[in-house]
Image (spheres, helix red, strand yellow):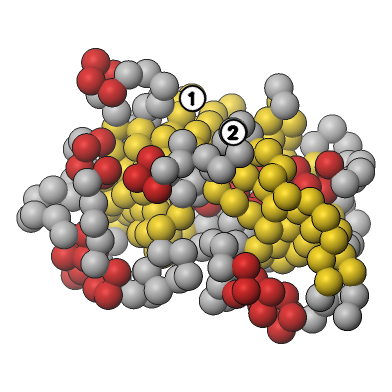
């Protein structure tokens, strides 16, 4: 049994317990993949990460990301949460930006005003979703015919497909039947109405991972990165906007999206809730 520095952080929130929790094991180079997977299943969080020495000479650190079921090549809130934990533990980046190495390659992370943001990675799968799969999603979400306005693959490593509804209230009212969406990662998005909903955010999002230990994710960086690439490419969102996520779970996640030139950055706040030593 070995001892490791451990942190549990809350991502996409300035307030503890209102974002998306992440377990981070630092200096985890001696752990096997099997041991990592077992610990991730034990935490029962949407993701657990393990921070390692980089293999790529351009990277500041390497991270492996596990859900309760599998390892992911990339995920958003684990990227920001792991970077936050690494910096808090004394990590010093080589340059102005932090460079994270993970399954999809190198991910750029920047610091601005006390928040972190990652550069949205290229989509591994994009374009329209087959009509039969959209119908499966519609039934799984319990929606009437015609309620799904658009559907698009927005997969940057986590397998996401996204559907758009007309109204925020429709998103918040969803009570999905996960048995009909097993094996799918489905994001649902709708715009806020400024007069009715206010201006604290411009879109409402929910993220469903049917079959996972956490079937709904409270604040999702990878999904929102993929959705941003979709919306911005089709002129469906402004160059800078805020996403609200997690309300039905008692959370208040806020994801910042900003397009700078050809780059799309996904950011937000992270706060440390637990830190100590892990015996594993």
Could you tell me which residue is drawn at 35 percent across and 37 percent down? 204
Above or below, 254 relative to 78: above
Assign the N terminus to one quadrant of the image: bottom right
Query: Which quarter of the figure has residue 230?
Result: top left
How crowded pointer 2 is (Cα within 10 Å; few <14, some 14-19, many 20+) is rated as some
Above or below, 117 relative to 160: above
Secondary element under disc 2, as helix, strand or loop, is: loop
Measured Cα–Cα span from mark 2 to mark 1: 23 Å
How crowded pointer 1 is (Cα within 10 Å; few <14, some 14-19, many 20+) is rated as some
Could you tell me which residue is drawn at 40 percent across and 26 percent down? 201
Residue 241 at x, y = what percent?
A: 45, 26
Could you tell me which residue is drawn at 20 percent across and 42 percent down? 170
Residue 94 visible to an observer of this rendering: no
Label drawn at residue 277: none
Could you tell me which residue is drawn at 25 percent across and 61 percent down? 176
Secondary element under disc 1, as helix, strand or loop, is: strand
The residue lying toward the viewer, choosing from 77 and 3, is 3
Image marks 2 and 1: residues in contact by CB distance under 8 Å: no
Residue corresponding to mark 2 = 15
Assign the C terminus to one quadrant of the image: bottom right
Q: Which of marks 1 and 2 precedes in the sequence? A: 2
Residue 25 at x, y = what percent?
A: 78, 62
Residue corresponding to mark 1 = 240
Q: Is residue 211 left or right of residue 259?
A: left
Residue lying furthest bottom: 34
């Amino acid at each position: 049994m070995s001892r490791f520095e451990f942190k549990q952080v809350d991502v996409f929130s300035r307030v503890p317990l209102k974002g998306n929790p992440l377990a981070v094991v630092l200096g985890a180079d001696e752990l096997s993949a099997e041991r990592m997977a077992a610990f991730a299943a034990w935490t029962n969080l949407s993701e657990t990460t393990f921070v390692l020495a980089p293999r790529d000479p351009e990277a500041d650190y390497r991270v492996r990301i596990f859900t309760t079921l599998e390892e992911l090549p990339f995920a958003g809130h684990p990227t920001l949460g792991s970077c936050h934990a690494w910096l808090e533990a004394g990590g010093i980046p080589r340059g102005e930006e932090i460079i994270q190495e993970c399954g999809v390659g190198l991910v750029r992370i920047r610091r601005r005003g006390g928040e972190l943001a990652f550069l949205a990675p290229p989509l591994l799968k994009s374009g329209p979703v087959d009509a039969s799969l959209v119908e499966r999603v519609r039934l799984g979400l319990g929606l009437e015919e015609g309620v799904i306005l658009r559907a698009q693959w927005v997969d940057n490593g986590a397998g996401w497909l996204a559907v758009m509804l007309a109204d925020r209230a429709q998103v918040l009212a969803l009570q999905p039947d996960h048995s009909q969406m097993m094996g799918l990662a489905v994001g649902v998005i709708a715009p806020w109405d400024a007069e009715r909903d206010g201006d604290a955010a411009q879109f409402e999002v929910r993220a469903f991972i049917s079959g996972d230990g956490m079937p709904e994710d409270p604040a999702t960086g990878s999904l929102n990165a993929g959705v941003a690439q979709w919306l911005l490419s089709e002129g469906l969102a402004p160059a800078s906007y805020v996403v609200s996520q997690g309300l039905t779970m008692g959370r208040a996640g806020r994801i910042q999206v900003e397009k700078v030139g050809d780059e799309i950055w996904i950011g937000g706040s992270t706060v440390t809730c637990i830190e100590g030593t892990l015996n594993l």
